Amino acid sequence: GNERRKGASRAEEGESQTRPERIDRGRRKRTRSHQDTKGSEGDEEVQPKIQSGRAAKTRKHTKNEKTRKKEEEEKAEKGEGKERHGKRKKTSASKKEREEVGGKHTMKEKAQEVKRKNIIQQMNCIHNSLSSEELEKLKEAVDERKKLIQALRGKPWPIKKKCVILRESQEFVEKYEGALGKGKGRKLYAYKVLMSKALMGRPYGTIPRKTVPRAEATSAMDFAVLWDFGVSCIITLTLTTSCFLQWPFHATFRKMCFQGYAQYSVLFYGYYNNQRAVGWLKFRMPLSYFLVGVGTVAYSYMVVIRTMARNANESGVGDDNSFNFNWRMFTSWDYLIGNPETADNKFASITTSFKEAILEEQESQKDDNIHLTRFLRVLANFLVLCCLAGSGYLIYFVVRRSQKFALDGLENHTWWERNEVNMVMSLLGMFCPMLFDVISALENYHPRVALQWQLGRIFALFLGNLYTFIIALMDEINLKREEENIIKFNITVWEASLFNGTVSVNSTAPPVTIEPADVPRGPCWETMVGQEFVRLIISDTMTTYITLLIGDFLRAVLVRFLNYCWCWDLEAGFPSYSEFDVSGNVLGLIFNQGMIWMGAFYAPCLPALNVLRLHVSMYLQCWAVMCCNVPQERVFKASGSNNFYMAMLLVILFLSTLPAIYTIVTIPPSFDCGPFSGKQRMFDVIQETLESDFPAWFGKVFSYASNPGLVLPFMLLMVLAIYYLQSTSKSYKEANMELKKKLQTVVQNMFPPLVQQSCFNVYF
Amino acid sequence: MGTTASQLGKDLLSEYQELTFLTKQEILLAYKRFSELLGKDEKDVLHERVPMDRILTLPELKSNPFRKRICYVFSTSDSKNGSLTFEDFLDLLSAFSDSATMEIKSHYAFRIFDFDDDGTLDCGDLEKLVNCLTGETDETKLTAEEMRQLISNILEESDIDKDGTVNLSEFQHVISRSPDFVSSFKIVL
């Protein structure tokens, strides 16, 4: 308590020294004498002061602008003094403050109260002219204090110290700002405090988290799953809202194909009516279907690219490896590990990584037997190409066979023959990566590089398979369209026959009522495509779960129980428990997302199915990891940042949406099903909307804008902009490297080493 | 939760929220866990100082190779014995929380790794650090040659002023480029 009073009086003196001519000496003596009195006496004196203070306040309120300004400027002086006072407190008094126990709290409070009232009194009593600079200074002081309060959280000081500073600063701000703005500032400040307190309880922070003893740092896995989940959720939300918007308007089930119960559902393209405006809201259903489809793709692009940009920003100068050893040293330990077994694993892996890094550094100079290595690598790549070609041909062959089966009639064949295509694709996806792993043993690359090659090859495998599948699907689409033409022809013949029977050539006929259900139905290639994708995804999911159960769970059970009666140690040697393959799983998620993107236009509820599937997968794999897996021995990430996986995701997004876009633009929609039936091309719906729903001038503007003569120069401009940005980015990188080198040489040469050390120690 | 919440006053709670990176739930959970560490006769949770060996029984710290250093760094006791009060404990959790900034984390990481508390990481500190990370057993320790090589590589990468030690700014420069640091330097109750 005494400390504070002394400090306050020190401040007063400081002020008075700077402006002796301004402050009335008599008043100063009076206030100082007030400061020196003990707490109890101070209380009695406070009473009359409070009253006078209040009186002074009312007087103040009635003053005019000029005198108020003068007062404010004066307060600036006080503010400065208090600042100095505050800073001094931080350095000298902070230690003592820390030692004060709660017992002294009340005395401190009282002393603070007294001091505050004194200062208010002073403010009210002194009416001297103040310049506008001092007003500015006061505002600055208040702003600085506010910034300090905001930044307090990020300061590396103990809480006690921060508490003191916080209370002081809050007091200062409240007093001066509130007084300044006639209470407006106070309200604003209180509002800000309230808002920050309200926002403090962020939704995710309110759930107390449980420690999960982590088997390993699966940051890439977590990220991918959560991100995937998030994006899937948003896509699902968009699609389901658009679905449910026209749910009450589907009184007519006219446009449905009659093969299987699921086909009635919202799941497939064929469910949707081609009515232009549905219900009393005049909901433009076909337009909405088209726009939602295009919109989800655009949204996905935006999200992926934004995430990549953010990752690139955070990882600083991109993906440089210049701090390899430092990072292994300082950032390799995972502080969330709570399990001693996990800790031991982590110690082992850290030791291995140190030893390998050291070896790598030593061997990077050596370069022996390069010809043999090169030959082996070429051989390995050749083998891999053979594998890829083989798998592509196998899929093509199987698809052709399934078409033959379809022509024969599906009932005559076994379950395997009916689902051959999907099963073959899933099995290839399971066994080929293992083959690639074996082949890569020939190559003798550094593990990180080998992992990147492996991922690249699996990527190529997946793409090859998917595109072969799509080409085969195209054949089927063409078949269906031929069928459609035949049926159209048949319908015209049938309708003609209805008329021919009742009327002669030249008279007008009474309209013949045709029952809608009697009209022969046309085939629906879009629904077929959607069905194929759903089947693909389901078979993929089933394969994953079955491999999980057999490959991981069964293996773990066998190893655990057969170990008792086996000749060699099953747990240490072959086969032991299976490792949790982070990169393989992330890749699986990415491919899954690619398939969803491909099929989403033709099977709108596919994202919803996928969300469900992700939920189930997450829990199943969580259990499997805890129960049957061991962490990888060497944790080599494909790259430092997550941008590697995001880049793959971007490529897959592009390649997945390509087939859908191609079909939208080239193939005419079925005449008899879906929201675009009867149109020449699917995007004609936009043309229609422009013509009928928008004013005439809008349509003109749009037609000018979509003129190739305008679009081509625009594209050229964008290409030039990309080129320009790339060259500036390269020059920035070079400048960065130069500055780094310069920094090193400057610091080395400027000072002798001893002075340097002391310099840095003091400064930092 | 009801009884513990009433023991930690609302004002104090909101003040702690203002001064740390922790949310209200996290502070209350910390209060509960800290009060579990106290003995039967120690009732005043806010002002009692808990000795280091009891703090180290927390499962979150038990397996951490830097547990003792963490206690020393966050302790505000005069005798530097690593004992923590509740506020020190909150400081600890705040620095290791999800929302703490890179600056705070790197500042405290530096202090934790500075075994001799001289403000720089010299060869002795780095050696102790490596020994902590490679575990206690002899099989996992690095040989003297490997250690020497490792330390010289580290200094080559990060020591900009070539004084043979890594100071705070050099450390922060290295750490800010690391993609893993923020996510690994985390302790959650």
Image: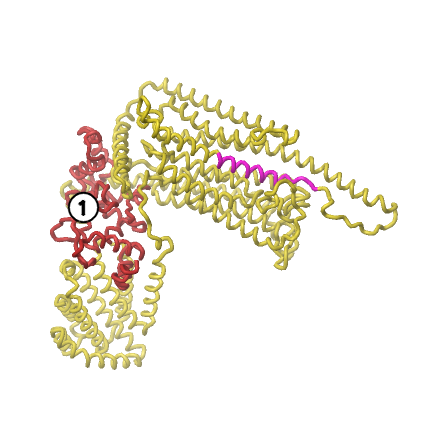
Chain colours: A yellow, B red
Label 1 belongs to which residue? Answer: A760
Residue appearing at x 29%, y 35% in the figure: A324
Residue appearing at x 18%, y 46% in the figure: A760
The kind of secondary structure element at disc 1 is helix
Residue lying farthest front? A565
In the rendered view, does A731 fall on the left or right side of A486?
Answer: left
Residue A704 % position (x, y): 61, 50
* Chain holding disc 1: A
The kind of residue on which mark 1 rests is Phe
Identify which residue, A575 or B171, lies in the foreground: A575
The part of the image, by quadrant, that contains residue A752 is: top left
Residue appearing at x 67%, y 39% in the figure: A523
Number of marks present in the image shown: 1
Residue A157 % position (x, y): 21, 54
Q: Is residue A530 magenta?
A: yes
Image height check: is A744 above or below B25?
above
In the rendered view, does A377 fall on the left or right side of A92?
Answer: right
Q: Main secondary structure of the magenta part?
A: helix
Identify which residue, A166 or B153, lies in the foreground: A166
Mark 1, Cα crowd under 10 Å, few <14 / some 14-19 / many 20+, is some
Residue B10 % position (x, y): 28, 63
Any part of residue A301 in sight = no
Residue A548 % position (x, y): 42, 34
Any part of residue A132 in sight = yes
Residue range in magenta is: A521-542
Q: Is residue A649 magenta?
A: no
